C-alpha cells in the first residue's frame, strides 16, 4: 500500500504541488466563465471544478490530467437551464455520471481506436485556437456600428481597445513565462507570472479588469443536496437529450485529452478506469450543486508543462481552488485577468501542433483534409463532438476508398478457349463491390468460369450481393461457375446471406 502511494501520489511532490497551484489559479476565471455560459451562478462552476478535480484525482485513470467544468459541456446545458432551471441541470449531471459509469464498464473507451491521428491533431489545433480566441475578449471588444460609405449604409466593425496596461501586462507576463525557464525551473514560470503581475497591479492601483469582475465568488463550502425535481418519466424525458449529449462529449473529450497527456508524458493511462472515474465524479458533483464536467485540454497542458505528473497535482488544484475562492476570495479577486490571459496564450501556443503545418506538404491530401475539416468544424460550431464526428466520417470514407482501390482482378483463358479463370486479389466490400462486378465479361462465350478467391476476402453483405450478381449473370449467359479458395470467414457470410445457390436465386436478386 505504501509503495502504491509513493508510486502514484508522492513520487513528484514539489512538481505536483506547484503545478496544482498554477492550475488552481487558472481554473477560477474559466469556471466562472463556463458558469455564465451555461446560465447558472458562478459558484456552480467553481463547486464543480473542485469536486470533479478531487474525485478524478482519486478514481480516474490518467494521473496528471485535470478535469473540471468545461466550455464544451457548458454549451450543451444552455437550453436545459434556460427552460427548466438549475435543479434539472443537477439531475442531468447525476444521470450523465451514471451513463458514463455504465459505458465505461461496457468498454466505450475502445471507440477511441476509430479516431485517427489526423482527427486527433485537428482536435488539438482547434482547441488551441478556441483557447486563444477566448482570450481576445480580455484584450478588446468588437462592436458593429452603423456607417455611411460611398452613399451606402453599412455596419462596420469597431474595435474598443482596453487600457494600455492590459497589453503591457500580457506582454510582460509572456516574457516571464518564456524567459524565466532559461534561468531557473525551480518554480513554474506561469505561477511566477501570476504572482508578479498581481503584485504590480495592486502596488500601482491599475484600473484594469480582474478576477473579481468576472462574477461573485462563493463564501461557503459545498454541501450535499438532492436535486429538487419530480422523480418521474416526464423529468427523464426533459433531461435525457441533454444527458446523452453530455455523456458522449464528456467521455470523448476526456479520452482524447488522456491520449494527449499520454503523448506529452510518454506514459500510458487506464482508459476504462478514466471513463468510469469521470462518471463517478459527475454523480457526486450533481449532489453537491455542481455542473457536469470532463477533462480539460488547456489545464492539463498547463499542469504537465508546470511539472505536474501524478495524482497529487489534480488533487491540489481542486482543493486549492476551493480554499482560495472561499477563504482568500478578497485576494484572489484582485488577480488581473491580463496575467491569466498570458498563461492561457502560452497554453494555446503549446497546445497547437505546429508540426502539422509543415506536415501539410508531406502527409497525404486525405489526411490533410481530415485534419483541416476537424479544425474548421470545431472552431465554427464550438462543439467537439460534431468536429470529431466529421473527422471520423471523412477518415472512414477516405480509408474505404483507398482500400477499395487495392483490389485487383486478372483473368486467363485456357488453351481450348472454353474456360475463363478470374483471380481476385484484395478486399471486397461496399466500396469495391461495383469494381468487382465490372471486372467480369458477361458477354464472353465460354463454357466454364472459375473464380479464384484464395487471395480475396468478402467483408459485408454488399460484397456478397456483388458475388451473387456475378455468378447469376454468368449462369444466365450459359456458363458453369466454380468458386475456389473462399476463406472460412467469407464462406460464413456467403452461406448466411448469399442467394446464388438458392432455388429462387433470380427472384431474390430482383427483390434486392
Image: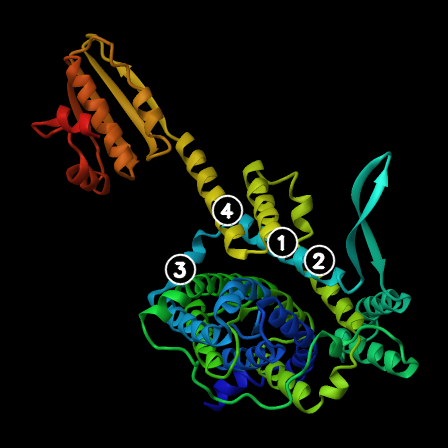
Q: Quadrant of the C terminus?
A: top left
Asked whether residue 102 is in view, the answer is: no
N-terminal label among 4 and 2: 2
Mark 3: few/some/many CA within 10 Å (<14, 14-19, 20+): few
Element class at badge 4: helix
Q: Which mark is residue 133?
A: 2
Mark 1: few/some/many CA within 10 Å (<14, 14-19, 20+): many
Task: Say above or below: 123 vs 311.
Answer: above
Which residue corresponds to the image point at 71% horizontal and 59% vertical from the top-left? 132
According to the picture, the residue beneath numbered tag 4 turns out to be: 390
- Residues under labels 2 and 3: Cα distance? 32 Å
Is 445 positioned to the left or the right of 317 in the image?
A: left
According to the picture, the residue beneath numbered tag 3 turns out to be: 110
N-terminal label among 3 and 4: 3
Element class at badge 1: helix
Residue extending furthest toward the left: 503
Mark 1 or mark 2, whichever is nearer to me: 2
Mark 2: few/some/many CA within 10 Å (<14, 14-19, 20+): some
- Residues under labels 3 and 4: Cα distance? 19 Å
N-terminal label among 1 and 3: 3
Q: Position of residue 194 (x, y in %)?
A: 78, 77
Q: Nearer the viewer, residue 396 or 319?
A: 319
According to the picture, the residue beneath numbered tag 1 turns out to be: 126
N-terminal label among 4 and 1: 1
Q: Are marks 1 and 3 in contact (CB under 8 Å)?
A: no
- Residues under labels 4 and 2: Cα distance? 22 Å
- Residues under labels 1 and 2: Cα distance? 10 Å
Amino acid at each position: 500500500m505504501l509503495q502504491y502511494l509513493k508510486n502514484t501520489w508522492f513520487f513528484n511532490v514539489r512538481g505536483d504541488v506547484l503545478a496544482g497551484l498554477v492550475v488552481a489559479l487558472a481554473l477560477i476565471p474559466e469556471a466562472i466563465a463556463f458558469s455564465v455560459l451555461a446560465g447558472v451562478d458562478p459558484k456552480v462552476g467553481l463547486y464543480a471544478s473542485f469536486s470533479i478535480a478531487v474525485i478524478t484525482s482519486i478514481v480516474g485513470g490518467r494521473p496528471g490530467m485535470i478535469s473540471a467544468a468545461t466550455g464544451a459541456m457548458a454549451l450543451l446545458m444552455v437550453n436545459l437551464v434556460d427552460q427548466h432551471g438549475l435543479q434539472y441541470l443537477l439531475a442531468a449531471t447525476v444521470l450523465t455520471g451514471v451513463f458514463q459509469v455504465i459505458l465505461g464498464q461496457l468498454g466505450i473507451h475502445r471507440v477511441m481506436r476509430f479516431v485517427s491521428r489526423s482527427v486527433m491533431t485537428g482536435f488539438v489545433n482547434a482547441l488551441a485556437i478556441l483557447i486563444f480566441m477566448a482570450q481576445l475578449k480580455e484584450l478588446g471588444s468588437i462592436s458593429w456600428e452603423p456607417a455611411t460609405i460611398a452613399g451606402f449604409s453599412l455596419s462596420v466593425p469597431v474595435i474598443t481597445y482596453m487600457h494600455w496596461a492590459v497589453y503591457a501586462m500580457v506582454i510582460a507576463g509572456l516574457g516571464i513565462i518564456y524567459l524565466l525557464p532559461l534561468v531557473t525551473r525551480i518554480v513554474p514560470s506561469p505561477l511566477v507570472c501570476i504572482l508578479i503581475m498581481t503584485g504590480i497591479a495592486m502596488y500601482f492601483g491599475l484600473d484594469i479588469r480582474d478576477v473579481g469582475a468576472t462574477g461573485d465568488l462563493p463564501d461557503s463550502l459545498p454541501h450535499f443536496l438532492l436535486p429538487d425535481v419530480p422523480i418521474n418519466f416526464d423529468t427523464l424525458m426533459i433531461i435525457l437529450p441533454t444527458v446523452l449529449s453530455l455523456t458522449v462529449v464528456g467521455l470523448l473529450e476526456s479520452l482524447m485529452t488522456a491520449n494527449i497527456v499520454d503523448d506529452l508524458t510518454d506514459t500510458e493511462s487506464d482508459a476504462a478506469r478514466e471513463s468510469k472515474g469521470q462518471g463517478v465524479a459527475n454523480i457526486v458533483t450533481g449532489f453537491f450543486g455542481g455542473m457536469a464536467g470532463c477533462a480539460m485540454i488547456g489545464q492539463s497542458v498547463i499542469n504537465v508543462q508546470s511539472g505536474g505528473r501524478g495524482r497529487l497535482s489534480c488533487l491540489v488544484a481542486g482543493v486549492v481552488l476551493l480554499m482560495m475562492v472561499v477563504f482568500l476570495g478578497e485576494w484572489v479577486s484582485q488577480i488581473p485577468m491580463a496575467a491569466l490571459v498570458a498563461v492561457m496564450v502560452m497554453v494555446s501556443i503549446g497546445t497547437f501542433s505546429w508540426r502539422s503545418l509543415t506536415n501539410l506538404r508531406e502527409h497525404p491530401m486525405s489526411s490533410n483534409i481530415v485534419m483541416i475539416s476537424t479544425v474548421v468544424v470545431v472552431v465554427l460550431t464550438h462543439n467537439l463532438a460534431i468536429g470529431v464526428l466529421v473527422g471520423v466520417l471523412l477518415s472512414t470514407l477516405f480509408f474505404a476508398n483507398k482500400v477499395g482501390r487495392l483490389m485487383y482482378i486478372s483473368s486467363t483463358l485456357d488453351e481450348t478457349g472454353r474456360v475463363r479463370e478470374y483471380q481476385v486479389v484484395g478486399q471486397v466490400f461496399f466500396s469495391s463491390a461495383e469494381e468487382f462486378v465490372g471486372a467480369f465479361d458477361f458477354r464472353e462465350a465460354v463454357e466454364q468460369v472459375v473464380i479464384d478467391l484464395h487471395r480475396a476476402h468478402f467483408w459485408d453483405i454488399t460484397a456478397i450481393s456483388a458475388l451473387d450478381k456475378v455468378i447469376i449473370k454468368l449462369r444466365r449467359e450459359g456458363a458453369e461457375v466454380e468458386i475456389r479458395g473462399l476463406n472460412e470467414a467469407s464462406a460464413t457470410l456467403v452461406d448466411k446471406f448469399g442467394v446464388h445457390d438458392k432455388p429462387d436465386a433470380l427472384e431474390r436478386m430482383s427483390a434486392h
